Amino acid sequence: MSKYKEIKGFKVQTLASDTVASALPGTTWSSGNNLNTAVLGNTGFGTQSAAASVGGTAGSITNHVEEYDGSSWTEVTAVPTGADSMGSCGPQTSGMVFGGQRPPNTTATYEYNGASWTAGGDLTTARRDLIGAGTQTAGLAAFGAVDPPFSAEAEQYNGASWTNIAEGNTARRSAGGSGTSTSALAYGGYVGPPGATNAVEQYNGSSWTEVSELNTARLGVGSGGSSGTEALAIGGEGVAVTEFWNGSSWTEVADLAVARGNKFGLPSGPTNAALQAGGNASGASTATEEFTVPGDFQKINVGQVYFNSGSNAFKVTGLSGSSGTWSSGGALPQVMNQGTGCGIGNTSGMAMTGSSPPSFTKTTTAFQYNGTNWTEVGELNVAKSNSSSAQNSPIATTLNYAGDGPGTYSKTNEAWDNVSWTVKAELNVAGNGATGFGVSSTSAGRAGGQSTATPPGGPHYTGTEIWDGTSWSEVNELLASRRYAGGVGTVTAALFIGGDTDSGSFPGGRYTARVESWNGTSWSEITDLNTGRAYAVGAGIQTSAIAFGGAPPRTGATEFWNGSSWTEISDMAVARQGGTGNGSSASALSVGGESPLSPAVTATVEEWDGVEVNKTITVS
């Protein structure tokens, strides 16, 4: 007969320590055996256990080649003609080098088969201090010095000839570079006075895009990485710093023991098998260092339950909004201001209604987001702006209500079933600028705003209405009247965040930091925001939320609510008001709005990602 635990239980892994997001904090550089000949300006290809060092300057420009087997360097067949500061790519047994200076700069390309060298097709432009990526049959050469100017030119190699492709954005020399011919990265380098840059560009096979900058500007950067979404920027002239690229940002990891500038790197090799050899460390160097990533760490995994034997505690891994980052998302097909939205995270959102320049005509449009692109879906029956929605509902079942209708405040109400919008029973009181909350097209709430229930120029509306799928019911009012507040939650547990009171004498000022909490029966005042504002957008639930954006002045400020207090965390890249958003405190979208930039109304979308954290399971 089966035991109960065999039917209902599950195995819990025992770990000696908590899981971690990455092994990066445990990375190290360790000394390898020295090169046979001190050299600087050498280039490299391969991996840590099978690498080649080619050319450079060893007293004079050399054609010297050495191979590394993970233990020691061996002199092998020299490249036909030596050069300094060449580009390179590929594995040890099928790598290639190209360009460089002899002087003058050269267009020469040489292919290596692990034993001998063969001349390949020439670059279209002679240059030195360029980056390389890819393989012997699908290579990339870009940037560099075309004396006297620097270059942003890029070329691709098909195994026989080079072809010019889209140029980069910033001409430079002595940058680091790595990846493939269709997914590459260029980082750092020299752009002329005043000196080194921390600018980074990413190539996707058709164009170069500026992405997050290095933490430390430098030139003569060593490189490593087999794609444009993972790379190492190693050292530089007078610099020992190493930084890791995770596809969106750079993190400083272990420093080199010997600070040095060099063009050496393994631009097609994995980041966990990087190597640095030779270089300019107050003169030509023989030093070799190997990059090591711990192999025994346990990677963090959302939803994982485990027992930490070191702390004698059960743990579960979840996402937290207490820290996180904003990153660029797919732009809306049209600029939008004063819209509203819904959704459950940054891979599933909806933006609807609003207005767009130049005429700022109210719109019926609605768009859905899949984490990459927006698709226009069924139009609403009534055009409006400053409307409200069931903020916490998924995109397949939501509600849009009230707002600025054609020439007047609206009390229209429409339900979305993922196919079309259907007109439902109207609100009791028409209005706009209200705060919406709720989880579906049959469960939503509306509070505050401007309305026909208050006289022009008088105090804003304090009314609250709840929708049960059939009708709206007026319930207990807000404690303080205001409009353009953020909101999150359900019809029994919601937050009303900040807003515009229209009164400078209101406690805390016209643009208030006041927050109220709804328990399904009444509103109560809770801890204020750190920064008072109107037009803030909320995402999350009553006990875990973020509030972002707002005005005046227009801001990108983001605050996290843990159920008892607000904490300022990462700002958005684009400050804005009148935008929309959705999601949770750990995964949210910020969509459109009005920024201080020109043009003011934007189609910009930013995605919020919380961090993975391990929480102790407590039993009461």
Image (cartoon, rainbow, N blue to C red):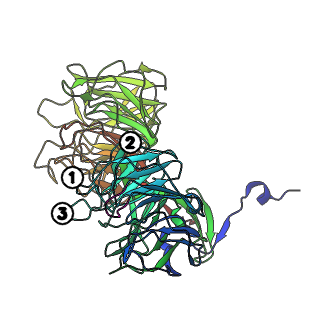
Q: Is residue 453 above or below residue 515?
A: above
Judge by depth and name the residue closer to the eye, 392 or 170: 170
Judge by depth and name the residue closer to the eye, 222 or 210: 222
Mark closest to the chain's N terminus, 1 or 3: 3
Q: What is the x, y in percent for residue 367?
A: 39, 29
**Front disc: 2 or 3:** 2
Q: What predominant SS class does the magenta segment belong to?
A: loop
Around disc 2, counting alpha carbons within 10 Å, would you say few (fewer than 14), some (14 to 19), or many (20 or more)? some
Q: Is residue 206 above or below residue 267?
A: above
Judge by depth and name the residue closer to the eye, 395 or 103: 103
Q: Which mark is residue 193?
A: 3
Residue 387 is at least partly visible in this image: yes
Q: Which mark is residue 532?
A: 1
Name the residue carrying label 2.
165
Q: What residue is at 16 percent from the left and 37 percent from the top? A: 459
Q: What residue is at 39 percent from the left and 50 percent from the top? A: 202
Mark closest to the chain's N terminus, 2 or 1: 2
- Distance between the alpha carbons at the discs numbered 2 and 1: 50 Å
Residue 543 is at least partly visible in this image: no
Reply yes or no: does residue 543 show up in magenta: no
- Distance between the alpha carbons at the discs numbered 1 and 3: 43 Å
Circle 1: element type: loop
Q: Amino acid at mark 1?
A: Gly
Image quadrant assignment for residue 560: bottom left
Image quadrant assignment for residue 384: top left
Q: Tell me which segment is drawn in magenta.
A: 100-106
Around disc 3, counting alpha carbons within 10 Å, would you say few (fewer than 14), some (14 to 19), or many (20 or more)? few
Circle 2: element type: strand
